[in-house]
Image (cartoon, helix red, strand yellow):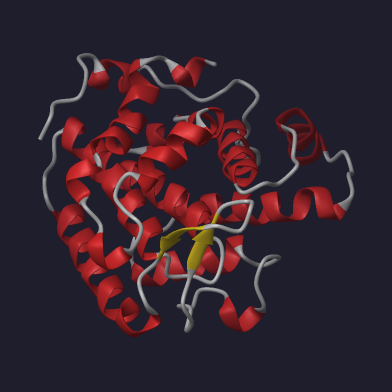
Amino acid sequence: MEKAPKGLNHAFEALKDAEISTDTFSFYISVSSVYSSKIEGEAIDLDSYVKHKKFGIEFSPDYTRKIDDLYDAYTFAKVNELNKENIAQSHSLLSKNILTKNRQGTYRTQNMYVSTPDGRIEYVAASPFELEAEMEKFYADLTLLLKTELSIEETFFYASMIHLVFVKIHPWNDGNGRSARLLEKWFLAEKLGDKAWFIQSEKMYYDQHQTYYSNIRLLGLEYSTLDYSKALPFLLMLQGAIINGYQQK
């Protein structure tokens, strides 16, 4: 495995919470929720959301409700163990205003295609017939990784891999990207502590969204033929966010 750039541990230890955060408001959870939502096309502005969340300034519910739901999912993750049951619960929280109640936290039962804005299929996810078995393998690997002592470089590598594998399986009817980015951060926090929640990875992925999606697409068109030897450009993005001081922007 390729080593992370020098200074990863130093850069991580230098992370600190924003002064604007309080016991009831997290600035960096707001950043995560806003930019992960913006990746999915939500028209939300960070400054407006902070005014809404911290100071109670009212906006149209349609403007804030999905971001509020994702904020609740991140807040849930901060105080709960990363496991199969809690991942399903986090999806129920973040998809409250995206999916019907019976589809929240449950696997899809139909084929899933990822399309371009012009309607061209760019990815075919795991079939519903193999979905449960693939997710059981995912959770088995996750459990093993959580029990294994890892260096900080390995921790960032596997956090990114969890993100990538989850989004490639695409287990939910919707909210897969939001879940994958949350799981990445959740794994880092489980292994490295609460400083992980201060990483502005979602903002970096949004600002570099063309590269983000391009790197995800490098693996191939169909789940059954994915080539993970092409995953390194994606896996290095998260490390780069720390090393390049993105958390300070």
Classify residue 230 by image quadrant.
top left
Of 181 and 22, the residue lying toward us: 181
What residue lies at 64% left-to-right and 79% top-to-bottom? 101
Residue 81 in view here: no
Q: Is residue 143 above or below residue 29?
A: below
Residue 28 in the image, given as x and y percentages of width and height: 56, 33
Of 189 and 21, the residue lying toward us: 189
Residue 173 in view here: yes
Classify residue 149 by image quadrant.
top left
Residue 174 in the image, given as x and y percentages of width and height: 56, 66
What residue lies at 60% left-to-right and 84% top-to-bottom? 102
Residue 199 in the image, given as x and y percentages of width and height: 44, 30
* Quadrant in which the N terminus appears: top left
Count of marks placed on residues: 0
In the image: residue 115, left or right of residue 201: right
Of 95 and 115, the residue lying toward us: 115
In the image: residue 56, left or right of residue 152: right
